[in-house]
Amino acid sequence: MVEIEICYGGGLHCSAKHGPSGAGIETDAPVDNHGRGEAFSPTDLCAASLGVCMLTILGIAADKQGVDITGAKGRIGKAMSSDLPRRIGKISIDLDIPLPPDHPARADLETAAMSCPVHHSLHPDIEKVVNWNWTG
């Protein structure tokens, strides 16, 4: 089990320290929820986690197939629901993969990325939209 230390610093700011590496992150409440929006909000981190998890699993699958996807990148959009309880309603991800659209590994790579642990951990009511841009 990975341990993460968390601390509320006041003013709706929190910090988290990753036990194994010592790496840290800061969060802030978003402007639309009483914060100053000076850092990732917890729900921003959730959306970002989906994107980087997909890229990580994509990288693992690409490595297994001897395919280089260095430089793959993306953009993530997160929309909160308009009803209560306050929650993420939709996460949109645009992924730019530096391979041609007709690459023989394309289907396997897309399947692998869509099976990332974060994707499987998010509530099924969260709409997840993934747009693949094969740019090679």
Image (cartoon, rainbow, N blue to C red):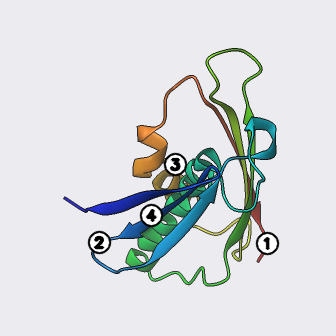
Q: Residue 92: x, y in percent?
A: 73, 44
Q: In this view, does 132 lie to the left or right of 27?
A: right
User: Do tag 1 and tag 4 residues touch (Cβ < 8 Å)?
Assistant: no
Q: How far apart are marks 1 and 4 (CA)?
A: 36 Å
Above or below residue 35? Residue 55 is below
SS for tag 4?
strand
Which of pointers 1 and 2 lies earlier in the amino acid sequence?
A: 2
Q: Residue 100: x, y in percent?
A: 73, 72
Task: State how many labels appear.
Answer: 4
Which of pointers 1 and 4 lies earlier in the amino acid sequence?
A: 4
Q: How far apart are marks 4 and 3 (CA)?
A: 27 Å
> Which of the labelled discs sits on residue 16, or is there none?
4
Residue under label 1, please give it.
Answer: 135
Relative depth, front residue between 50 and 135: 50
Residue under label 3, please give it.
Answer: 114
Which of pointers 3 and 2 lies earlier in the amino acid sequence?
A: 2
SS for tag 1?
loop
Which of pointers 3 and 1 lies earlier in the amino acid sequence?
A: 3
Relative depth, front residue between 28 and 100: 28
**In front of the other: label 1 or label 2?**
2
SS for tag 3?
helix
Q: Residue at x 62, y 49 (%)?
A: 12
SS for tag 2?
loop
Q: Which residue is drawn at 45% across and 48% down?
A: 118
Residue under label 2, please give it.
Answer: 19
